[in-house]
Amino acid sequence: MNRAERAIFQHLHPFMQEHGFERYIQSEAMWDKPMPGGRWRFTVGSHGNGIYWLYPMVSVRFHQIEEIIDADDDLHDEAQLQSTLLTDLSEHPFRRWQSLLPPRRMHYRFTVLDEHFERDIQRALAGLQEIFLTDALPYYQRFSDLAEVEWVLNRAKDEERHRYVHAGRELAGLTAAWLLGRPDFEQLLARYRTPKGQQAASFDLATWQARIDKLVARLRSVPRGQGLAVREQA
């Protein structure tokens, strides 16, 4: 962690503990809270030296989805292992996602200068606390529902997809649809087996279809609609 990240962690940690979040990893300003069948995560990312930028990220993980996908290492990459949905709140597209969270007029990225370090840290702290209460908590509450997660992965417009738009989004979307017993699963599968446009050009089609088929074979060994039990617990 750089100087700003260490300082924001020390100041923000008691606030996060008040809301039931505990530190996840020693080397980052990252906190987790268990939810039925998964976990919530709040992260303050940072980069810079002398001039630092702090930015909040929120994510939700459904263990069952990720464990099914990750049963073999070749089905998704390390960055995708951690979260089922992930949103960097400092990204400009986030501010257009009014269907997911209330529209807000505030800065989601905070600048900290060495010459005004304590002042800037206090301003960032106040902003991060407000973002957590007004943006992060509604996000966690909504996406503790597996049906909402499935909607974002499979039905939302491109700018409303929270996950990194890699192959893992389709794999997670198929898994969520299966676990919820979505009746048009076969149509969804056909759509994802034949990617179009820029996405189709980004990887080898035969390799991609082999990954899809491997996942579907695994899903067919899991009772369809099993995710409804997780949904009812949330």
Image (spheres, rainbow, N blue to C red):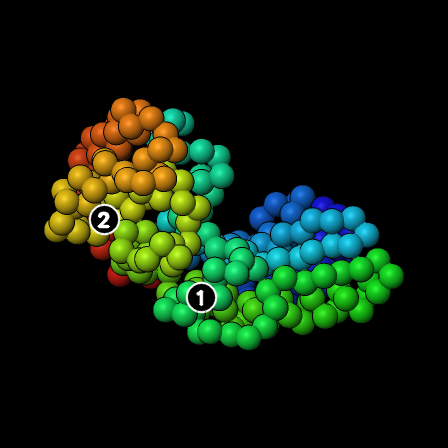
- Which residue is found at the position 31% from the left and 58% from the top? 156
| Vertical arrangement, residue 206 with respect to residue 223, above or below | above
Q: Are marks 1 and 2 in contact (CB under 8 Å)?
A: no
Outermost residue to the front:
197
Look at the image and tell me in which quarter the C terminus lies.
Answer: bottom left
In this rendering, the count of numbered labels is 2
Instruction: Say which amino acid is labelled 1.
Output: Arg
CA neighbours of label 1 inside 10 A, class few (<14), some (14 to 19), many (20+): some
Residue 96 disc label: 1
Residue 40 disc label: none
Question: In which image quadrant can residue 111 be found?
Answer: bottom right
Q: Earlier in the sequence, mark 1 or mark 2?
A: 1
CA neighbours of label 2 inside 10 A, class few (<14), some (14 to 19), many (20+): many
Q: Percent x, y for residue 15?
A: 63, 67
- Where disc 1 sits, the SS reads helix
Q: Percent x, y for residue 117?
A: 82, 62
- Which residue is found at the position 52% from the left and 60% from the top? 92
- Which residue is found at the position 69% from the left and 56% from the top? 53
Please give left or right for residue 82 compared with residue 119 in the image: left
**One can see residue 226 in this view:** no
Q: Percent x, y for residue 56?
A: 58, 59
Choose between 157 and 126: the one closer to the eye: 157
- Which residue is found at the position 61% from the left and 68% from the top? 107
Give the residue at mark 2: 177
Instruction: Say which amino acid is labelled 2.
Output: Ala
Choose between 70 and 54: the one closer to the eye: 54
Number of the front mark, 1 or 2: 1
Question: In which image quadrant can residue 146 be found?
Answer: bottom left
| Vertical arrangement, residue 74 with respect to residue 188, above or below | above
| Vertical arrangement, residue 102 with respect to residue 1, above or below | below
Question: In which image quadrant can residue 210 be found?
Answer: top left
Mark 1–mark 2 distance (CA, rounded to whole Å)? 26 Å
